[in-house]
Image: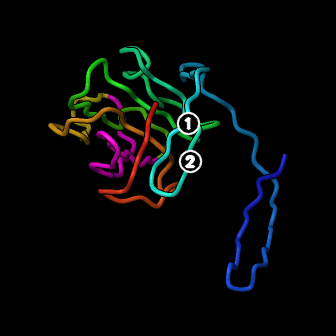
Amino acid sequence: MFLCRLTATFSLMTAVVGCEAAQPCEENVGAQTIEQRVEVEVGDASVTAELADDPTERERGWKKRACGREAILLVPDQPGPLPVWGCELVDPIDVVGIRGDSVVFVERLSPCALPCGGCPTVGDGIPVDGLLEVPANALDVSIGAPASIP
């Protein structure tokens, strides 16, 4: 299996592709993988995200998850604040709050070990229609950027 990086130089309309061998990924048996996927538009990007739309899926999110993390969309039962924390995350993530048709916040969330009581949260008190979680630095998006969730 190979991971490939594509770097495009648009002024010359050329592309340079470099590939490197991928490291095998072993998933923690306690990690959640959600089968249902949705397309999320945020800024100039279109992202295929796992859909976490029930309380258990939202609470578990990417806890202990190391493999296959492109994006996860957490959707509350009703629009409103949906604070999240980094308890048992494997790697840092970026959390993108979406309300209506725009981004209302973007925050980095770092892993936090058990016990979770001292873990910082993001999204406190900010009403959202959904939260998009992506690996840190995966998206270049800012507050006010256009966004669309199903």
On screen, residue 87 versus residue 150, left or right, reads left
Q: How is the image coloured?
A: rainbow
Q: Which of 72 and 130 is in front in this view?
A: 130
Q: What element carries label 2?
A: strand
Q: How many angstroms separate mark 1 from mark 2 (CA)?
A: 7 Å
State which quadrant residue 131 falls in. Answer: top left
Q: How many labels does the image show?
A: 2
- Spot the residue most to the right: 1
State which quadrant residue 132 falls in. Answer: top left
Write the residue at 25% across / 33% down.
Answer: 83
Q: In this view, does 14 lie above or below 121?
A: below
- Spot the residue most to the front: 101
Residue marked by disc 2: 46
Tell me where residue 99 appears, x and y as whole percent.
29, 40
State which quadrant residue 119 falls in. Answer: top left
Residue marked by disc 1: 39
Alpha-carbon neighbours of circle 1 within 10 Å: few (<14), some, or many (≥20)? some
| Residue type of the residue flagged with mark 2 | Ser
On screen, residue 117 versus residue 51, left or right, reads left
Write the residue at 80% across / 60% down.
Answer: 20
Q: Residue 101 carries which label?
A: none
Does the stretch in magenta take in 28?
A: no
CB-based contact (under 8 Å), mark 1 and mark 2: yes
Q: What element carries label 1?
A: strand
Range of residues picked out in magenta: 92-114
Tell me where residue 98 appears, x and y as whole percent.
33, 41
Q: In this view, does 36 lie above or below 104?
A: above
